[in-house]
DNA sequence: CAGTAATCGGAACATCGTTCCGCTCACATG
DNA sequence: CATGTGAGCGGAACGATGTTCCGATTACTG
């Protein structure tokens, strides 16, 4: 059989449902091509929703089939909309990542640079820590996650870089780090126990005004 | 067919070959049971040897079959001797881990506590960094790696703990950390780029004499 | 030299990612 | 509203991998 058509009609064009924001391979109405079919959009939404649940329950490594089943679609459909695993992950977390970026702006405005850096890092830590498997995926080297790495590099790295520069200029931070490296380091630390403590140490390390690898002057 | 018997006889009991040290599930002659059959010991040695090569080439996640094939045995044989993946990993790296532990003693004797801590950490970093997939395996949560985690906790943690205490007592380190947490943190950092730099920051963080999460007094 | 049990090999089974393709039906069109 | 068409769907099928099982084999004991 194909699929029971218990599909609730969706408003065409105009008003966008909340799910539309999270859709991955957006075929924006701007691109000349014909807009996506209604049932297709419905499925994309269902997949993202299902993935969100499954990722939370079993981590981002959860079996593809589990997601498809929960969404009530076949694996073929899943792959049609999300050829790369990271496409689905991005769709699910994009919003949260964007919020993380936005948070930086607020923190910068309401706190001194050093504090803003600390607070933002903790926020980022929380985000990553609650996404089981995210850090591992990010550093797996698997090309299936490339776009996800890109998204991190493009959005999060510049944000952190700004915070780092500010804190350095204000004299609170004395050590230099590549934003991308720091980001990946923090993500990695979220694997193990005592993650927050370790991230805290890293932040403390940034404050040290001696040369690395040597005992305090 | 079974196996061509091109097996070179091995001295019984007495002199132990170098491989015997690395054998995993050692059926010590002490335990009343009958000693392992000669061909079995031979296979264990071949497996460890093969695993060493394959791990280096493809990381510790390498397919089981690749190891078995390289060792010239069936997968059944591999599983017979190393029911858990970590058993094989332990067998391969036990020696290096032990050397790492031993190195601590030397460093303690020839350097001030703080320096010894730094140097030992770097040595540990090198060890983990060159074992692709080791860190990931360690923190995968997969029960197949439990014994490996144990080995780390049992051998490496006490060593680092000693170094940490000494450096704290000498006034060089001001922050407290659980040795196990630190160990796992460093291992995790070895995933990403700029690993050494990040480990360096962690070590710098230990020196900080302010409260964590706050700007320098 | 024969008997026995330890050991072996690899087929068989389960899980997972990924591809492929015939079948359907949503939508534009008349 | 009827109709044609291709976007889209489902799930079988394939390949890789981990793990178990058991009949065949042979190392060792007596």
Image (cartoon, coloured by chain):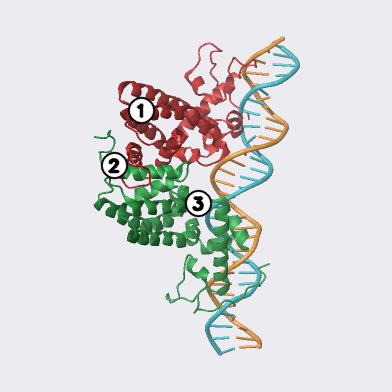
Chain colours: A green, B red, C cyan, D orange
Q: Which residue is mark 1?
A: B169
Q: Residues within 10 Å of mark 3 (few under 14, many from 20)?
A: few
Instruction: State whether discs 3 and 2 lie on one chain.
Output: yes
Q: Which mark is residue A208?
A: 2
Neighbourhood count class around disc 2 (C-alpha, 10 Å): few under 14, some 14–19, many 20 upward = many
Query: How far across and down, in percent of the image, does residue A39 sit?
Result: 58, 72
Q: Chain of mark 1?
A: B
Circle 1 crowding by C-alpha within 10 Å: few under 14, some 14–19, many from 20: few
* Residue B82 drawn at (x, y percent): 57, 30
Which is more foreground, mark 3 or mark 1? 1
| Label 3 element class | loop
Residue found 52% across the figure and 52% down from its top: A60
Alpha carbon distance from label 2 to label 1: 20 Å
Read off the residue under disc 3: A130
Residue B179 image offset from top left, x and y in percent = 44, 33
Task: Let me know if residue A209 appears in the view.
Answer: yes
Quadrant where the image shows the C terminus of chain A: top left
Taking the spot 40% from the left edge, 58% from the top edge, the residue there is: A151
Residue at 53 percent across and 50 percent down: it is: A61
């Amino acid at each position: 059989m194909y699929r029971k058509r218990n599909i609730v009609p969706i408003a065409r064009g105009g008003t966008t449902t909340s799910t539309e924001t999270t859709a991955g391979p957006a075929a924006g109405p701007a691109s000349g091509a014909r807009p996506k079919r209604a049932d297709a959009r419905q499925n994309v939404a269902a997949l993202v929703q299902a993935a969100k649940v499954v990722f939370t329950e079993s981590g981002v490594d959860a079996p593809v089939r589990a997601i498809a089943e929960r969404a009530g679609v076949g694996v073929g459909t899943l792959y049609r909309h999300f050829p790369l695993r990271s496409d689905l992950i991005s769709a699910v977390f994009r919003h949260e990542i964007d919020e993380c970026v936005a948070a930086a702006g607020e923190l910068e405005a309401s706190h001194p640079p050093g504090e803003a850096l600390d607070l933002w890092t903790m926020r980022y830590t929380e985000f990553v820590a609650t996404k089981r498997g995210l850090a591992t995926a990010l550093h797996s080297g698997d090309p299936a996650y490339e776009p996800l790495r890109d998204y991190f590099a493009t959005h999060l790295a510049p944000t952190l870089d700004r915070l780092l520069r500010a804190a350095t200029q204000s004299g609170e931070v004395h050590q230099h780090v590549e934003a991308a490296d720091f980001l990946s380091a923090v993500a990695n630390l979220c694997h193990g126990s005592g993650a927050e403590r370790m991230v805290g140490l890293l932040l403390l390390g940034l404050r040290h005004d001696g040369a690395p690898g040597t005992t305090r002057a």
